[in-house]
Amino acid sequence: MITEKKAMIKNGIILSLFALITTGLVTATQIMTKDQIAMQEKRQLLKVLEQVLPKGKYDNELYLDCAIVKASFLGNKKPHKVYRAKKDNIPVALIIESTAPDGYSGNIEVLSAIYLDGTVAGVRVLKHKETPGLGDKVEVAKSQWITKIKNIQVKSEQDIRWAVKKDGGMFDQFTGATITPRAVISAVKRASLYAQNETDMLFDAANACAKVDK
């Protein structure tokens, strides 16, 4: 009995040491890769920002100049970043994160670059769970559909052009999938209207991204 007890204690100690070593290794790996992951995320962000708004349109560091807003008009009340493009310190455009809550398989996270007159400069989908082969055509890697949402102004909330053709609008839907493009178009339209209605507030808001590299 004593021998069995000693064996159990020994095994417990071994398991505890193994758990501590494993946890330590995981923690060390996270610490060592933290900066690398942050740099990769920064590169990806810069790449997407330049895709939606041509670099020549602004001269400030976009990823270091943003406001964070909570507005249900952008799809839900979670925090959304709004990047502020300026040239010679003059406001040029807003790049707005928004959510399409009515995707076929859930939320679709959208990034829309909006000039001050409400014209859409470019759009990309940041995250989605849409059906492969159908709804995932919102990805620029799968289809050029989203690259065509640009250089078009949103005139008002009643601007019926901002819809898929099935609903009487001017944008193509996907074969066999209308819900996904409908949701994205609606999200972009709301982002443009929000930018037009809240321009001054968004440019005057405190900078929430200045500490990124500090």
Image (tube, grey):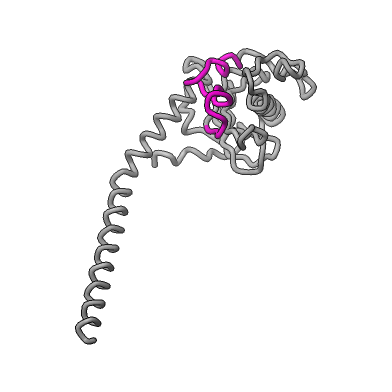
Q: Which range is magenta? A: 127-149
Front residue (pair 98, 136): 136
In the picture, measured across the screen, residue 73 lies left or right of residue 20, that is right
* Point 77% across, 16% down: residue: 168
In the picture, measured across the screen, residue 87 lies left or right of residue 104, that is left
The picture places residue 10, in percent across and down from the top left corner, at 22, 75
Outermost residue toward the bottom in this view: 2
76 part of magenta stretch: no
State the image quarter where residue 134 is shown: top right
Front residue (pair 164, 1): 1
Query: Does the magenta stretch mainly form a helix, a strand or a loop?
Result: loop
The picture places residue 28, in percent across and down from the top left corner, at 28, 52
Q: Is residue 83 above or below residue 52?
A: below
The picture places residue 45, in percent across and down from the top left corner, at 45, 30
* Point 55% across, 33% down: residue: 128
145 part of magenta stretch: yes
State the image quarter where residue 38 is shown: top left
Report the label total.
0
In the picture, measured across the screen, residue 60 lies left or right of residue 80, that is left
In the picture, measured across the screen, residue 133 lies left or right of residue 119, that is left
Q: Is residue 151 above or below residue 192?
A: above
Outermost residue toward the right in this view: 158
The picture places residue 43, in percent across and down from the top left corner, at 39, 29
* Point 24% across, 72% down: residue: 11
Instruction: Work out which quarter of the rendered image holds the N terminus and state it.
Output: bottom left
Instruction: Work out which quarter of the rendered image holds the C terminus and state it.
Output: top left
Front residue (pair 167, 190): 167
State the image quarter where residue 182 is shown: top right
